[in-house]
Every structure is written in C-alpha cells, then in structure tokens.
Image: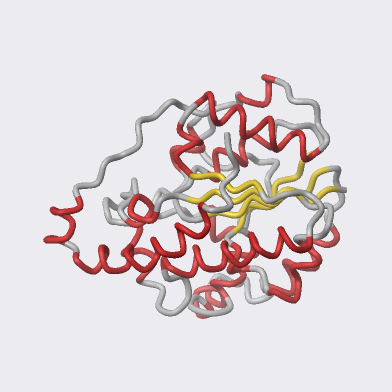
C-alpha cells in the first residue's frame, strides 16, 4: 500500500486533483478527515457534541486511517492537521507527497461561492486555529521533512499550474510516476456530481458545505483552462489593509516554499 498525500493551501484546486486521482484503480480517498478532527477538537467542540459526533476525534481518525487497506491510500489534508509525531506514519519513507501552493493574495481574496465573502475572513473567524499564515508555515516544514526523510521528492506545485490542462496533465503524469502507475488519459476526466463522490470517505461536517467550498469541483469533469485572477493591490489596500498586511507576512514563507517548486 502506498500513501498518496495531497497537502493543500486554501483554494488551490486540491479537490479537483482528488477527483482526478480517484479515477486511478485501487485508490481510496480520505477527504479532510484529519482537518475536521483538528477543528472539532479545538474551535468547534461544542458543535461536534451537539451533532452527536463526540466520538469523532484525531485518535479515531488516525485509527481508521491505519486500518484502511487499499493499493493507494489518498488523503487530501492541510499539514497543520497532522501531529508531527505521526509524520512517520502518514509521510512514511515510501509516500507520495503533493503540495498545492496557491499564491497568498489569491488564496486570501478567493470569494466563497455560497456567501460572497473572502476566504480570508472565513479563516480568521476561527481564532488561533486556522490563520492564513499557518497553512503556509506548516506546508514549508512538511516539505523540508519530506526532503530529509522520504524516498521520493516532494512535488511542490504552484496552484495556478492546475488551471491549465497542459500543465495539470504533466502534474498528474509525475504523480503517476511516483505511484508506479502507468499514466492514462482516462485519468483526466471524471463525472460531474452534485455532491461528494459516494466512494469517498468524507466526514459529515465537510458534507455540510455552507460556504460552497467544493461546488465547482463537484460539478467539474476535467481540469479547465482558466486565466488566473488579477488582484488590484491598490484598491485592496484602501478597502482591506488587514489582508495586505497578512499577505506581506505570508509572502516571505511563500517565497521560501517556491524555492522547492517542481518544474513543469
């Protein structure tokens, strides 16, 4: 069994990549189970108990993860949700590790389909749990861990590359190579759905997608050619100087991450 880990920074087309990899025979998708355990044990403990899911915990998710048997065990997660003492379990020597890194200004100003609000504001509503900066800092630390401890090189992918069919294809080809799977063009198309793939293991909390985080990925059938969104920095500085200040801090981390970027 091979661990295939999709590590994300927000709004980096990670769900679309998960949909792609789920077309590969022998895969099992475990979708944000650690991330929700992390949130539910911190900020949302009350909501977890009210929902009758008080047994959903990091420990239970880890046990389920270790008990999942398949050819390719694929997780889509934020690195911050994995406790460092369990890196040797999840990011083991034979694992495939894909880091999708969106440019910070684009991540923070991504608009939630269902609410119309900035993703930055949604993140900051979860105090001391999921600040924008921590996604990038923990990703950087994990990249360094993979480089030092894993047999296969980290695939560090700038998020905009997944917005091109040509480069997304090369990314998938590289992932297949690390997985030991012969690439097939069939992997690049999938069925449009109204919700999550019923074959995926998805926590109930993620299924209640009030912000519409996953709507576009559900409806998609392939990687689309999309022009990267332009941000008017001067306008944003006047309207939301708090976002600009946060992005300045994250950009320092982002620049270091990009030193490890995989060429496609």
Residue 183 placed where, x, y %? 74, 25
Q: Is residue 85 above or below residue 145?
A: below
Q: Residue at x 53, y 24 (%)?
A: 166
* Outermost residue to the front: 259
Tally the numbered discs. Answer: 0
Residue 201 placed where, x, y %? 69, 51
Residue 47 placed where, x, y %? 50, 74
The image quarter in which residue 132 lies = bottom left
The front one of 22 and 147 is 147
In the picture, the quarter occupied by the C terminus is top right
In this picture the colour scheme is secondary structure
The front one of 153 and 226 is 153
Q: Residue at x 64, y 46 (%)?
A: 155
For residue 107, side relative to residue 28 (left or right): left
Q: Residue at x 79, y 32 (%)?
A: 25
The image quarter in which residue 242 lies = bottom left
Residue 76 placed where, x, y %? 63, 52
The front one of 113 and 177 is 177
For residue 87, side relative to residue 258 (left or right): right
Q: Residue at x 62, y 25 (%)?
A: 188
């Amino acid at each position: 069994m091979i661990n295939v880990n999709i590590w994300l920074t927000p709004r980096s087309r990670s769900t679309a990549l998960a949909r792609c990899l789920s077309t590969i025979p022998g895969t099992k998708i475990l979708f944000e189970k650690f991330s929700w355990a992390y949130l539910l044990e911190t900020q949302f403990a009350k909501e977890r108990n009210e929902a009758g899911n008080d047994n959903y915990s990091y420990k239970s998710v880890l046990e389920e993860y270790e008990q999942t048997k398949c050819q390719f065990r694929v997780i889509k997660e934020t690195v911050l949700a994995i406790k460092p003492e369990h890196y040797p379990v999840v990011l083991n020597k034979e694992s495939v590790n894909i880091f999708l890194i969106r440019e910070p200004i684009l991540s923070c100003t991504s608009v939630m389909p269902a609410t119309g609000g900035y993703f930055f504001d949604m993140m900051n509503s979860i105090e001391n749990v999921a600040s924008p900066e921590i996604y990038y800092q923990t990703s950087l630390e994990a990249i360094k861990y993979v480089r030092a401890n894993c047999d296969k090189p980290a695939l560090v992918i700038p998020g905009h590359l997944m917005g091109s069919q040509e480069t997304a294809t090369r990314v998938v080809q590289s992932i297949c190579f690390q997985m030991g799977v012969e690439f097939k063009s069939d992997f690049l198309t999938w069925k449009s759905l109204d919700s999550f793939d019923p074959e995926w293991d998805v926590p109930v909390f993620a299924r209640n997608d009030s912000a519409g985080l996953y709507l576009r990925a559900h409806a998609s059938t392939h990687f689309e050619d999309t022009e990267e969104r332009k941000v008017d920095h001067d306008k944003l500085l006047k309207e939301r100087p708090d976002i600009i200040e946060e992005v300045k801090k994250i950009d320092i981390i982002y620049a270091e991450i990009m030193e490890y970027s995989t060429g496609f």
